Image (cartoon, rainbow, N blue to C red):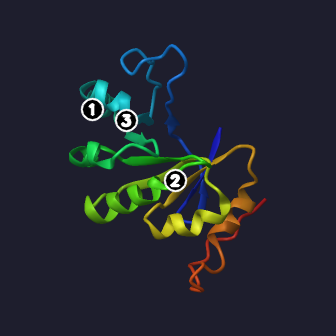
Amino acid sequence: MFKLLKNGQIVSDGWKTLTLSEGDTPQNVRLPVGPVLVPLSVWQARRAELIHREYEHGWPLGVWLADEQDPETIRHDIDDFTVIGLAFDRFSDGKSYATARRLREQYGYQGELRAIGDVPQERLSYQQQVGLDAFAVRANQKINTVLTGLTGSDHAGQTRRQPAAVAG
């Protein structure tokens, strides 16, 4: 279960993030009901079906990219996505940061750009700077602690916009 920080606010997350389990293939994985973020491989294998679901049921559609996946692969499809998720791995080389910037600046993506996976609190400020506006927070993380990564001053000494106070 994930919590979501979006534009400095804690919000409920109605999206399901689909991952492939052992034995699953992009062609046979069961799609959940409702808004879903699918991995790139599922989008590529079942594009027509996913678009049909979106129009038939009104369920928003999203895709997520692993750190090593090139956003060029979805460049012509970005208008189909309400959310694009970028997976962060604690041991990655940071390609997801460059991907976020490319999606915003080069491809003009205006929808929600969400960080998923291992999102270190100390890097949230930088993630905002490259265009990410939502952060999936694992249930075992204290949301108020993570929220502090969005407040204060960034590394350049500039003051950022303060998010609203969090109750509880």
User: Is residue 18 found left or right of 121 in the rendered image?
Assistant: left
Q: Is mark 1 on a helix, strand or loop?
A: helix
Q: Which amino acid does label 2 sit on?
A: Asp
First along the sequence among labels 1 and 2: 1
Which of the two residues, 95 or 45, is positioned nearer the viewer here?
95
Q: In which quarter of the image is residue 22?
A: top right
Residue lying at 65% horizontally and 74% vertically, measured from the top left: 151
Which of the two residues, 23 or 137, is positioned nearer the viewer here?
23
Which of the two residues, 69 or 36, is positioned nearer the viewer here?
69
The image shows residue 7 at horizontal and vertical percentages of 52, 64
User: Is residue 138 found left or right of 14 in the rendered image?
Assistant: right
First along the sequence among labels 2 and 3: 3
Q: Give the mark toward the camera: 1 or 2.
A: 2
Q: Name the residue under label 3.
A: 40
Q: Is mark 2 on a helix, strand or loop?
A: loop
Q: In this view, does 152 lie above or below 65?
A: below
Q: Name the residue under label 2.
A: 93
Q: Is mark 3 on a helix, strand or loop?
A: helix
Q: Residue furthest right?
A: 168
The image shows residue 90 at horizontal and vertical percentages of 62, 49
Question: Which numbered disc covers residue 51?
Answer: 1
Q: What residue type is labelled 3?
A: Leu
Q: Which residue lies furthest to the left in this view?
A: 76
Q: In this view, does 162 lie above or below 43?
A: below
The image shows residue 150 at horizontal and vertical percentages of 62, 69
